[in-house]
Amino acid sequence: MIGLCGNVAVGKATSNGQTIKTRIVLDEIRRCFPNEEIDIVDTVHIRLSPAKEMFHLIKLINKSDRIVILPAFSAINILSLLISFFRKHKSTYYVVIGGWLPDMLRKRRSLKNQVKKYAGVYVETHNMHETLAEIGLDNVFYLPNCKPLVESMPSHACIKYHFCTFSRISKEKGIEIAINAIREIKEKNNELDIKLDIYGKPDDEYMNQFNMIRMDLPDYIEYCGVVDSKKASSVLKNYYALLFPTYYHGEGFPGTILDAFASSLPVIASDWKYNAEIICEYKTGLIFESQSEQSLANAIQYSITHTNVFMNMRNNCFNEAKKYTPENAMKQFIQHLKDGRRECI
C-alpha cells in the first residue's frame, strides 16, 4: 500500500499552489500504480477533525509500504517526528513544495537528521539540490514543478500590451510593485494601450490593504478574481506577458511560471530565489531586479519596444513546458516508488 499525506482538498476548486501540486503527484501515482491500494490523509481535514485525522495519519504511517509526504512549512516538524517514532523513516518519500527547506534545515539540526534518513527528498530546483547536498544530505533528487499539458500550443488573441499577474496576492508577491510599474509606463505615454489584470486570492492578512488599493486603481488596472487551476491556460493565452514580481521567502518553482509556459506566455519575473534558473532570459522571459519598481518598468518597456522578440518567445515557452509534464518530471520519483515496493516484498 502507498500512503500519501498532503493538502489534497478533495472536492474543492482551488488556485492554491500547494494543493495543485499535491493533486498532480497523487494523480500520477494513481496512473502508474493502478493495481495498488492508495490511502490518503488530506491535511485539510486535520484542521476540521484533528483527533480523527491524527489517528488516521498514525495508522497510515504504520501500515503503508511506502509513504509520500508533501507537508507545508508549518507541518514538517510534527510530521517528521511522527514518522521518526512510528515508522523509523523506512520507505518515506518527501516531495518538497516551495523553496524554504534549505533555510529551515540549516537552523534545525534535529529535523535535518530526520530528513537525511528518508528514502528520497525531491526538490523543485537544481539550486536547492546543490544547497542541500552542501549541508550534508545525500538523498536529494530533482523533481521540478509539473503540470499536464494541452495537446497543442494555445492560439493567442491579438491583445497588445495586456499584462497580468496570476498568483496568490500579498505584498511579498509583489502586487504593489506590478501596479506601480504599470502606472509609471501609462503616465509617461497615456496613448499606449497597456493594461494589467490581477488574478488570485488575496491573503487574509492582506485583504484590507488590497481592498484599499483597489479603490484607487485606474481603469486600465483591474482585479479579475480567482481562476481555477484547470482553466489557467484559457485565461493566460489572452495576454501579452505574465508579471511575477515576487520577493516571497518561501518561493520554489512557482506554479504560475509553469502555467504561463503551458499557455505559451513569456514571463517577466524578479531575480528572486530560483526564478533565474527557471526562466531563460530573452528566450522565455525577462528577469528584473527584485523589489525595484523601476527595474520592472524598464523590463515592461523593453517588452513593448521589442514586440518581435516577445512574440518569438511563445514557441519557446510552450516547448519549455513540455519538460514539465508529470510523465517527464516525475519519472525518477515513480521509479523510486517501484523500487521501494520491491524492497518491501
Image (tube, rainbow, N blue to C red):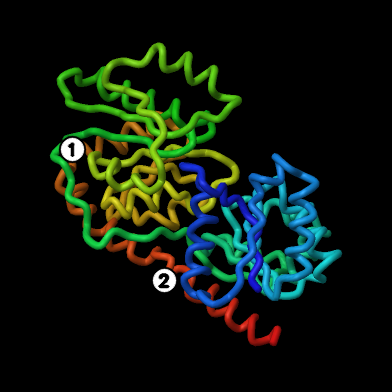
- Of marks 1 and 2, which one's residue comes earlier in the chain? 1
- Horizontal side of residue 107 vs 316, given as left or right: right
Amino acid carrying label 2: it is Asn
- Measuring from the top left, give residue 344's x and y in whole percent: 70, 83
- Give the residue at x 58% y 27%: 204
- 186 is higher (above) or lower (below) than 265: above
- Horizontal side of residue 21 vs 162, given as left or right: right
Q: Disc 2 marks which residue?
A: 328
Amino acid carrying label 1: it is Thr
**Quarter-of-image position of residue 298:** top left
Farthest residue, direction right: 85
Near-viewer residue (162 or 154): 154
Q: Is residue 133 visible?
A: no
> If the image is split into quadrants, where does the N terminus sit?
bottom right
The residue tagged with tag 1: helix, strand or loop? helix
Near-viewer residue (67 or 115): 67
Q: Residues within 10 Å of mark 2 (few under 14, many from 20)?
A: few
- 151 is higher (above) or lower (below) than 66: above
Q: Disc 1 marks which residue?
A: 305
The residue tagged with tag 2: helix, strand or loop? helix
- 12 is higher (above) or lower (below) than 128: above
- Measuring from the top left, give residue 38's x and y in whole percent: 61, 68
Q: Tell which tag, 1 or 2, sits nearer the viewer.
A: 2
Near-viewer residue (161 or 270): 161
Q: Is residue 178 visible?
A: yes
- Give the residue at x 81% y 59%: 82
- Horizontal side of residue 224 vs 137, given as left or right: left
Q: Residues within 10 Å of mark 1 (few under 14, many from 20)?
A: few
